[in-house]
Image (cartoon, rainbow, N blue to C red):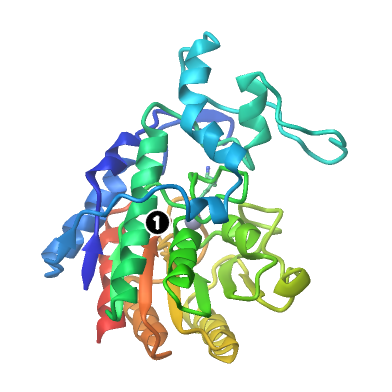
Amino acid sequence: MRVIYSEDHKLRDARTELHGGELVKPFEGPFRAEWIRAALKQKGFADEVAPTRYDLSVPLKLHDAGYLAFLETVWERWLSAGFTTEAIPISLPVRRSYHARPPHNIDGLIGYYANSVETSITEGTYQAALAAKDCAMTGADYLSKGNRFAFALCRPPGHHAGIDLFGGYCFLNNAAIAAQRLRDNGTKKVAILDVDFHHGNGTQDVTYERDDIFFASLHGEPDDAFPYFWGHKEETGKGRGEGFNANFPMLRNTAWPVYSEALEAALERISAFGAEALVLSLGVDTFEKDPISFFRLKTEDFLTMGARIAACGLPVLTVMEGGYGVHEIGDNVANVLIGLEN
Ligand code: Q9C
Ligand code: ZN
């Protein structure tokens, strides 16, 4: 399977993440992509290519123009305002912020565009996010040429990035951008299956009113897991998108037997939708040893996961999302890809 990887991911290397009331070393760092890449090389995935560069025309079909301009300029504006540390939002529009609008002051603007505050913005963050988007789009184009599988080793991840919101380590919604690219290349119905431990609230946001991109997410139930305010079963889409969004929240300690039932149900929905291509938002933070999550999947379960997903018969672009802390993330990702191909 072709692997699409850019060195530019290393430009996203934050020093701080707000976690449990402390600024800690981020769970989402460059080591993740390198561990995954090393495991892939070791397992014989030799077909690695750098991404093509793309402009913002496809991202602009999903994300707000003001938001993209913010991402491009925030670091410079943050420094110009006299701040010397990483950029962290403090005030967010919330319930009864009736007249919320983007403030001129960068300290306010960063909160306006945030859906959570653990994700510090740093020099190089935007460049890394652009490269991750390029990896996803390159993968989409590779599928459109008739190839069945590709893996976009995206970093930073994307599934928490909404229309005009960053957070949860995400800035641009790589998976949705890839789905849009597939649409633009002529694929009429695209499904996004999100198996990251966390609900793909950003992907849901950018696809919620659409009937040409079906979104299914398997995740820790919102009552107990980040991002907390999205991911309920009742969220089924809106307008022409009604019925084209499916959430599968699951309880703490969920292991493969229960997880696999939700996976089958999601795949059935994707078949019923009539998808012609699948974007797999792959987080391996469902792993039993993940430091910030609470499912109990084992390394061998990821092989089965890949095989089950491949059984739907669709072309699959796998896009990297989360998975933290332990070296096993490499083997877990490799297992999904091996399972897909076999
Ligand atoms: N401080 C992805 O997996 N914080 N994002 C959770 C740990 C945010 C996860 C609690 C987790 C974001 C792509
Ligand atoms: Zn996650």
Specify the quadrant of the image occupied by residue 270.
Answer: bottom right
Q: Residue at x 76, y 35 (%)?
A: 93
Q: Is residue 170 above or below residue 303?
A: above
On the image, the x and y values in percent for residue 155 come to 36, 49
Quadrant showing the N terminus: bottom left
Crowd tier of the residue under label 1, counting other residues whose Cα lies within 10 Å: few below 14, some 14–19, many 20 or above: many
Q: Is residue 141 above or below residue 17?
A: below
Judging depth in this view, the residue of 266 and 8 nearest the camera is: 8
Q: Residue at x 19, y 61 (%)?
A: 39
What residue is shown with label 1?
A: 323
Q: Is residue 160 visible?
A: no
- Identify which residue is drawn at 12% across, 64% down: 42
Callout 1 secondary element: loop
Q: Is mark 1 within 8 Å of ligand 2?
A: yes
Location of residue 148 with respect to 268 vertically, above or below: above
- The amino acid beneath tag 1 is Gly
Instruction: Report the side of 170 relative to 33 (left or right).
Output: right
